[in-house]
């Protein structure tokens, strides 16, 4: 098990099927067909059964900034245990550093405007979210289904856009080599134009997760 960004990136790069996205500005990887259709279907059903309106830290007053729905996935569920094991095996990150798995659902017209996964140092809610476990380090996000139109994830500062593709994993390091936050990881969950988009997200912290 590891917690250093360098060793995580090296481990990911060594996987035969994974692709490092060519950019010097961030450590960003994609892996197609990471999740099998049966597991994706189980996770989609769990999200549909227990979703709620998504929220954001440091509310900026824009009621339409994040319009998706979120589901907190219980750790004891077999499908959740299965995907957690897969993520641990892939990343090598000690699961003690991971936040609980979340699912997100985007209906037509819903989006998450450009944002970062790390909590902005000095932000209004920074201490509230980071006092115990530190800031977020790595993000692992998996598309659970294909989307008829829209719903891409756009990293504007990297000039990279990823289309939803069932089973595909995107993962990136939210930090720089010196430990500071990487502003280039700003990303936009673009509007779904037709259909519904389902994703699951796993975030890791600087220290063990303590809620």
Image (tube, helix red, strand yellow):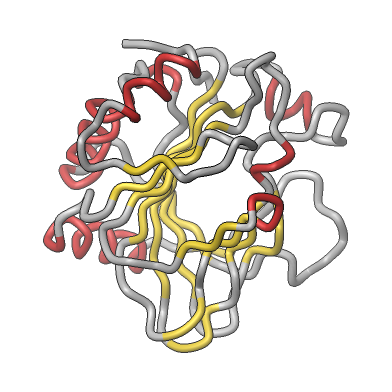
**Residue 70, placed above or below residue 117:** below
Picture quarter with the C terminus: top right
Task: Please state which of residues 156 and 119 is positioned toward the viewer in this rendering.
Answer: 156
**Residue 143, placed above or below residue 85:** below
Task: Please state which of residues 9 and 119 is positioned toward the viewer in this rendering.
Answer: 9
Residue drawn at (50%, 31%), measured in percent from left and top? 138
Task: Please state which of residues 58 and 168 is positioned toward the viewer in this rendering.
Answer: 168
Task: Please state which of residues 33 and 51 is positioned toward the viewer in this rendering.
Answer: 33
Picture quarter with the N terminus: top left
The image quadrant of residue 155 is bottom right
Residue furthest toward the bottom? 194
The image quadrant of residue 197 is bottom left
Expressed as whole percent of the image width and height from the top left, the position of residue 141 reads 42, 48
**Residue 172, placed above or below residue 179:** below
Report whether 42 appears left or right of 196. Answer: left
Tally of marks: 0
The image quadrant of residue 14 is top left
Report whether 191 appears left or right of 40. Answer: right
Residue drawn at (59%, 83%), measured in percent from left and top? 109
Expressed as whole percent of the image width and height from the top left, the position of residue 119 reads 72, 34
Residue drawn at (26%, 30%), measured in percent from left and top? 90
Expressed as whole percent of the image width and height from the top left, the position of residue 43 reads 26, 57
Expressed as whole percent of the image width and height from the top left, the position of residue 71 reads 44, 55
Residue drawn at (41%, 48%), measured in percent from left and top? 170
């Amino acid at each position: 098990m590891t917690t250093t960004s360098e060793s995580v990136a090296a481990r990911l790069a060594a996987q035969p099927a994974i692709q490092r996205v060519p950019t010097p500005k961030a450590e960003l990887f994609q892996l197609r067909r990471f999740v099998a259709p049966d597991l994706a279907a189980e996770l989609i059903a769990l999200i549909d059964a227990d979703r709620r309106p998504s929220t954001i830290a440091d509310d900026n007053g824009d009621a339409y900034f994040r319009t998706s729905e979120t589901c907190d996935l219980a750790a004891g569920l077999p499908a959740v245990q299965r995907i957690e094991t897969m993520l641990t095996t892939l990343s090598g990150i000690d699961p003690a550093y991971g936040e609980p798995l979340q699912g997100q659902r985007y209906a037509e017209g819903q989006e998450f405007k450009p944002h970062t996964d790390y909590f902005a140092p000095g932000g209004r809610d920074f201490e509230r979210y980071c006092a115990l476990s530190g800031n977020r380090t790595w993000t692992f996000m998996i598309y659970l289904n294909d989307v008829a139109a829209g719903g891409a994830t756009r990293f504007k500062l990297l000039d990279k856009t990823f289309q939803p593709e069932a089973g595909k994993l995107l993962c990136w390091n939210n930090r720089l080599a010196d430990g500071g936050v990487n502003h280039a990881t700003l990303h936009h969950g673009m509007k779904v134009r037709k259909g519904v988009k389902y994703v699951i997200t796993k975030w890791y912290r600087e220290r063990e997760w303590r809620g």
